[in-house]
Amino acid sequence: MQYSMTVDDSAVRLVGLSKVFRGGVTAVTDLSFTVSRGQVFGLLGPNGSGKTTTLRMMLGLVHPTSGSAYIFGHRMISGHPVLRRVGALIERPAFVPYLSGQRNLELFWQAGGQPVREANLEPALEVAGLGDAIERKAGTYSKGMLQRLGLAQALLNQPDLLVLDEPTIGLDPQETHRVRQLVREVAEGGSTVILSSHILAEVEQVCSHAAVIDRGRLVAYGAISDLTRAGSSVYVEVDDVESAVAILSVLTGVAKVSREGPGLSVRLDGLEREALVSALVQHGIGVETITSRHRLEDVFLQLLTEKSQ
Amino acid sequence: MIRVEFDKQVGRLRTYVFLGIIVAFPALLNLIFRVASPADHAGADQSFVVLAPNSGLNMAIATLGHAGDVVLPLLGVILAGSAVAEEASWGTLSYLLVRPVTRRRLLASKLLVVAVLIIAATALVTLLAVVAGLIAFGWRPVETPSGTTLPTGIALARIAITTPYMAWIMSGVISVGFFISSLSNSPLNGAAAAFGLAVSSQILDSFSFIGDVRTFLPTHYWRAWEGLFANPVSWDDMIVGSILQLPYVIVFVALAFWSFRRKDILM
């Protein structure tokens, strides 16, 4: 028998993480995944799927009912010294309302036991981009300003691991673009980024890896390039939806047909796209659009439709 | 951490409102006693209130009685009740705890700051009560309800001893407020619970037919410092009262630490 010692080089590792809140609400069930160092990792899921609870357990804010979270190999407990290397924006940015933005950042920093001069204050303030408003009371800030100040706060310690929970919520398109840019810059600096989102496109654009969770369970996990490989379903728009449904439902090689907006979502089970189009055309149905969906879209849309049913 | 918690209290409107109350209370009381004399309506009652106009220090003692019953406990329970819960209500509690700071350390810093502020408030009320009394009623020896007279120097020294006693004797009620604060997401809950406890305890304490059980009420010995102005000084009630705060403080502070360690921080 041979024993081998493995060095844990993961940034974050979740092992069988579960959370049942008092009152019996199950938020997360047996969640396991690993985020390697340097990845930009997307945690994707519909609202209420357990993303925030997962991140809170990861950071030691919520106690798991079972399982563990590890950050840089350290089993997470509240206030663990490894948090020195972590920056976080969780759920919503929050500040002491009667103190200025700048004072808030300074006190946040000092609460960690480090002198203000060691903080990455100037670059962080640049991220916040609040100008003179940084001297104003945080209670007077708009949602976008708070969000930017929250990002700045998360970057104060030039974190090796940056955890961002829905970072673009409440931001206008221009600000959203800036946040995505920022995430890329942080990642280029060698840091690991975990970003939660309920927006598929955001994760696709920014992340190198992703986990999709629904109702607290892992439903897909891997590199974005794998997850976005051509999937097994297509979206079709036709001139006669009724007849198209009737035809496709009985066609061999079609797993499921469902209406979606003005068109149809068709899950294929062996049938080629060309064959599907010709089948429709043979029956005199005009095909206006056909698009392939990749796996992540498949998974995610399926979740959303199941949820709305 | 402790510095940070102090800094949060400085430059805060609430702190100035509290300061204003602490300054206004002795001033107002002195003004009322100057305008209307309690002795005219007292009958045979010889409490410190009736004796207040006899000297500045008598007035100070009367002022402290009322400050210790209502004003200081009110400020104290607001400070303690909001200590943790207001961070939760702002949402900043999560951010305090994603720093490399243990929950125990955070809670200990908060508790220490509450304690120091309460002691400071008590000392300031005492000082201002003396100053206001001396301005309004002059530098004369203290007349005690038992009919004896205390020289000003001795009276001042004994007034100084009231500060630590008054601050400590509130600690049972304050601990309850702090415990509730560690659980709650609303800063009012702790203050309301602790103030409710203080008021109920004072009401129960007024029912003398209940018997000796009353001595275990957290507020029973709140006025025991008046024994400092008896002749000779009666220390017994002050000592018993001080010791009886211990079970309240130990139990509720321990509960606060225990529950805060287990708490899921969702705010």
Image (spheres, coloured by chain):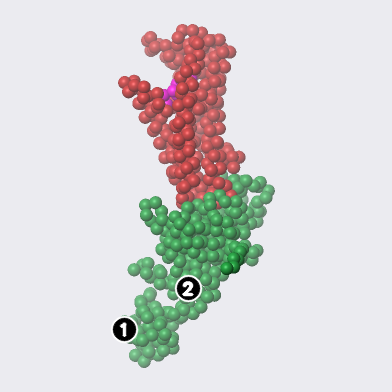
Q: Which chain is red?
A: B
Residue under the point 41% across and 36% down = B192
Camera-side residue of A46 and A148: A46
Task: Locate the N terminus of chain A by quadrant.
Answer: bottom right
Residue under the point 55% across and 29% down = B120
Q: Secondary structure at mark 1?
A: helix
Query: Which chain is disc 1 placed on?
Result: A
Query: Which chain is disc 2 placed on?
Result: A
Camera-side residue of B57 and A68: A68
Q: Position of residue A255 (x, y in %)?
A: 37, 80
Number of numbered discs visible in the structure rendering: 2
Q: Are marks 1 and 2 on the same chain?
A: yes
**Colour given to chain A in the rendered image:** green
Q: Nearer the viewer, mark 1 or mark 2?
A: 2
| Residue tagged 1 | A246
Q: Upstream in the sequence, badge 1 or badge 2?
A: 1
Please state the extent of the stretch shown in magenta in the rendering. Answer: B219-225
| Residue tagged 2 | A296
At label 1, counting other C-alpha atoms closer than 10 Å, the crowd grade (few under 14, some 14-19, many 20 or more) is: few
Q: Is residue A73 visible?
A: yes
Asked whether the beta carbons under mark 1 and mark 2 sit within 8 Å of each other, the answer is no
Magenta stretch: residue A118 in it?
Answer: no
Residue under the point 32% across and 23% down = B210
